[in-house]
Image (spheres, helix red, strand yellow):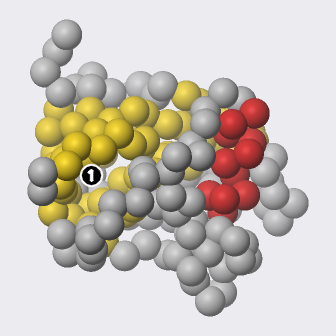
Amino acid sequence: MDAPLQLLAKVVQGHGVASGRAADSPYPQGSIAMQMPFFKALGLDLTDCWSGTLNLSIAPHSWSLLRADYCFEHLAWTALHPPETFSFLRLQLRWQDRLVAAWLYHPHPETKAAHHQSGSVMEIIAPRMEGLGYGDTVTILLPAHALLIH
């Protein structure tokens, strides 16, 4: 097995739509909470994860997904906009003395209606990591052949 790719990333603030924290979010309970039942029905159970995203910046680099563990195409999870395509990649986060199993959550930009992320930001779905906050640095460990780093 190949050695995992290790990326240093900084926790940054997101739009607040995934978690429902944004005052102007069209999804008061958050988009992730609304999407989770659809993902589960398609074989990806995220119930052990927090229903929001952890936004990790690898700036000045950007990334492209080459291989996903799951891809759900044209998923109609809301009536507010057309169906979206989502990919997920298993990974691990290392922070302090913890190693946490998590998922790269990748709503494909070409199907996403709004709330686009910078090309340097990875949205991660993970269990809640108490004490982790904006500005903290984590290490992302993932299969080396799954991402292209620019």
On the question of residue 105 being in view, the answer is yes
In which quadrant will I find the N terminus?
A: top left
In front here: 20 or 114?
A: 20
**Quarter location, residue 22:** bottom right
Q: Position of residue 106 (x, y in %)?
A: 49, 46
- The count of marks equals 1
Q: Relative to 105, is 32 on the left or the right?
A: right
Q: Position of residue 122 (x, y in %)?
A: 36, 54
Query: In the rendered view, would you say 131 is above or below 73?
Result: below
Q: Position of residue 33 (x, y in %)?
A: 66, 59
Residue at 65% across, 68% down: 30
Circle 1 residue: 62
Residue at 61% across, 33% down: 44
Q: Relative to 93, is 40 on the left or the right?
A: right
Query: In the rendered view, would you say 66 is above or below 19?
Result: above
Q: Relative to 1, is 72 on the left or the right?
A: right
Label 1 sits on a secondary structure element that is loop
Q: Relative to 19, is 68 on the left or the right?
A: left
On the question of residue 64 being in view, the answer is no
Q: Position of residue 23 (x, y in %)?
A: 62, 89
In front here: 55 or 126?
A: 126
**Quarter location, residue 37:** top right
- For badge 1, the amino acid type reads Ser
Residue at 46% across, 28% down: 68
